[in-house]
Amino acid sequence: MSLPSPTLPTPDRATHPLSAGVCPIVLQAGALTLSALVARPATPPRATVVALHGGGMSAGYFDGQAHPDLSLLVLGARLGYTVVAVDRPGYGLSAADLPRGQALSEQATTLRTALVHLGRRYDTGAGVFLLGHSFGGMLALTYAASDEASPSRLELLGLDVSGVGRDYITPPDAVADPLGQRTTQRHWGPLRCYPPDTFREAKVMVAPLPERERAEAARWPQRFTATTGRVRVPARMTFAEHERWWRHGDEDIAGLPAQFTAAPSFEVGRQPGSGHNVSLGWTARTYHLRAFAFFDECLARRTTTASAVTAR
């Protein structure tokens, strides 16, 4: 079966079908209730990966149903991680309480409170990695930039973001209509990058874009340098080959390491054969494996550093 016409589906309130081993949960963030999906390993987790979806999507983005290899949650659990895909503030169960959404700084605060609740409910292993896509990548970077030590907080170990960069290819005002037909090709790229039925399956993961996110996305290029300069954990950015929202030429990428001045390590990856929604395409598994390999390396360096300190 071929992919249907490249028209982004309208929001659908139907329940998202879940892969085996993936369960819905709720997280409390003060007075707010956030919906989420979780997949847990059979043994105690090495760490926990918190996945943050992009604008106009939902947590189901990380449990794609168009092909068995798409689900980040399933793969992560098999590799020994607990994976939690959160409906960001203004989506899922919190949409009614936040019809206009939240600013990035507010979302970071809400997420931090929700992760405290997560840590009380589940074994989170060594700590938390953030994996963010598009607007969720902006949130991951904002969270890391504002992360402060506290007795109740889960340790942030590193982050991986995709579908986000520093400078837009298109004018920022075009972001204000991400669900419109005129921006479908920018959001998805070539249809050949996605398995059959991708757009039909995507109907249940599409959600209205909160008004405040539109304004936040337009301001992101002005905030990028100040945000990335405060990230103090290992960081990785991935650009899809057919990314059409963000500039990712050789010169653009060459300048990115200098933006992460406080990070102990930083790397940039390219994902061949992928459109903007990298976690829903044919190369999703490859991208996810690379992200988990990066997390593995972060844990290995952390263990080596801790052993060296202990030996002194």
Image (tube, helix red, strand yellow):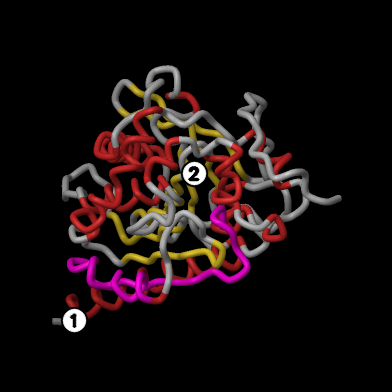
**How far from the left and from the top, in percent, is residue 71?**
62, 52
CA distance separating discs 1 and 2: 38 Å
Q: On screen, 87 above or below 131?
A: above
Check disc 1: other Cα within 10 Å, few if <14, some if 14-19, many if 20+.
few
Q: For this view, does 295 lie left or right of residue 230?
A: right
Q: Could you tell me if the residues under marks 1 and 2 are in contact, i.e. CB atoms within 8 Å?
A: no
**Amino acid, disc 2:** Ala
Residue lying at the far right in this picture: please name it. 1
**How far from the left and from the top, in percent, is residue 210?**
42, 29
**How far from the left and from the top, in percent, is residue 131?**
43, 54
Q: On screen, 300 above or below 80?
A: below
* In-front residue for pair 63/273: 273
Q: On screen, 251 above or below 90?
A: below
**Amino acid, disc 1:** Ala
For marks 1 and 2, the one nearer the N-term is 2
Q: On screen, 254 above or below 101?
A: below
**How far from the left and from the top, in percent, is residue 240?**
52, 64
Secondary structure under the numbered disc 1 in the rendered image: helix
Residue that mark 1 sits on: 311
Tell me if residue 265 is in the magenta stretch.
yes
User: Picture quarter containing residue 262?
Assistant: bottom left
Q: Residue at x 34, y 50 (%)?
A: 140
Q: Quadrant of the C terminus?
A: bottom left
Q: Is residue 205 visible?
A: yes
Tag count: 2
Residue lying at the far left in this picture: please name it. 312
Secondary structure under the numbered disc 2 in the rendered image: strand
Q: Residue at x 61, y 43 (%)?
A: 22
Could you say which disc has been placed on residue 85 in the image?
2
* In-front residue for pair 2/145: 2
Q: For this view, does 296 lie left or right of residue 58?
A: left
- The boundaries of the magenta stretch are 251-278
